[in-house]
Amino acid sequence: MIVGCLALNASFEPLTMVPLRRALRLVIDGKAEIVEADAERHIHSERLTLPRPAVIRLKAFVHVPRRYRCQYCGRLGAELKQRETLTRDHLVPISRGGTNDWTNVVTACSPCNTRKANHLPDEINMHPIHRPLEPHFVHLSWAVRKLTPTQARYIKLFYGTDVLHQLEKTL
């Protein structure tokens, strides 16, 4: 049985799981289309019969705002001064054996990045607010255990098998 419905952006990017009622409302209002449905079950109303959606796709692209902030001082990009910018900082600098992967990189404002320079976080007592993680649709990770094989296919299609398996391991 399908617990919820996977909502895809117009680009087919997985966005989130939505309750069945919300999915139906989006379809009925013409804001989404059913991409995959449970062939065994239908939803009936007085005037309408629809297949029970497992995956819906929004008809209009929805920009998902990503609010980046400095991981050292906590300021958002919009809070920076005119000549400041958000940069990326390697927790362990490349010159000191650090890697150029997601688990070693954080967002830092230019003043904090300059202050940290070529130091390790412990050496200068500058630790990131959040531990760096690979940024794959974290908003969906809570829902992975509820995905049906049909819904999981869309996660796999957009992000790849490795990402789907990584998320499944975190449960």
Image (cartoon, rainbow, N blue to C red):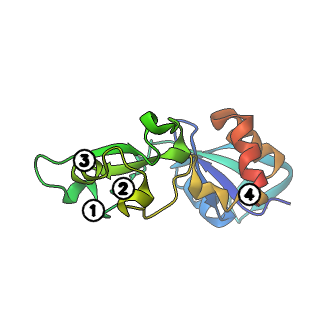
Q: Cα distance, mark 4 to mark 1?
A: 29 Å
Q: Which mark is nearer the camera, 1 or 2?
A: 1
- Mark 3 lies on residue: 114
Element under disc 4: loop
Q: 6 or 158: nearer the eye?
A: 158
Q: Earlier in the sequence, mark 4 or mark 1?
A: 1
Secondary structure at numbered mark 2: loop
Reading the image, the residue beneath label 2 is: 67
Give the class, few, some or many, for how many residues have Cα within 10 Å of label 2's Cα (few <14, many ≥20): few
Q: Residue furthest left?
A: 82
Name the residue nearer the viewer: 89 or 38: 89
C-alpha distance separating marks 4 and 2: 24 Å
Cα distance, mark 2 to mark 3? Answer: 22 Å
Q: Nearer the viewer, mark 4 or mark 3?
A: 3
Q: CA distance from mark 1 to mark 2?
A: 10 Å
Q: Secondary structure at mark 3?
A: helix
Report if the CB atoms under discs 2 and 3 are less than 8 Å apart. Answer: no
Q: Earlier in the sequence, mark 1 or mark 2?
A: 2
Could you tell me if residue 36 is visible in this image?
Answer: no
x and y percentages locating residue 89 in the rendered image? 38, 45
Circles 1 and 3, Cβ within 8 Å, touching? The answer is no
Could you tell me which quadrant the N terminus lies in?
A: bottom right
| Secondary structure at numbered mark 1 | loop
Characterize the local packing of mark 1: few (<14), some (14-19) or many (20 or more) Cα atoms within 10 angstroms.
some
Q: Position of residue 81 (x, y in %)?
A: 13, 54
Q: Which residue is mark 1?
A: 75
Measure the C-alpha gap from mark 4 to mark 3: 35 Å
The answer to whether marks 4 and 2 mark residues whose Cβ atoms lie closer than 8 Å is: no
**119 lies above or below 160:** below
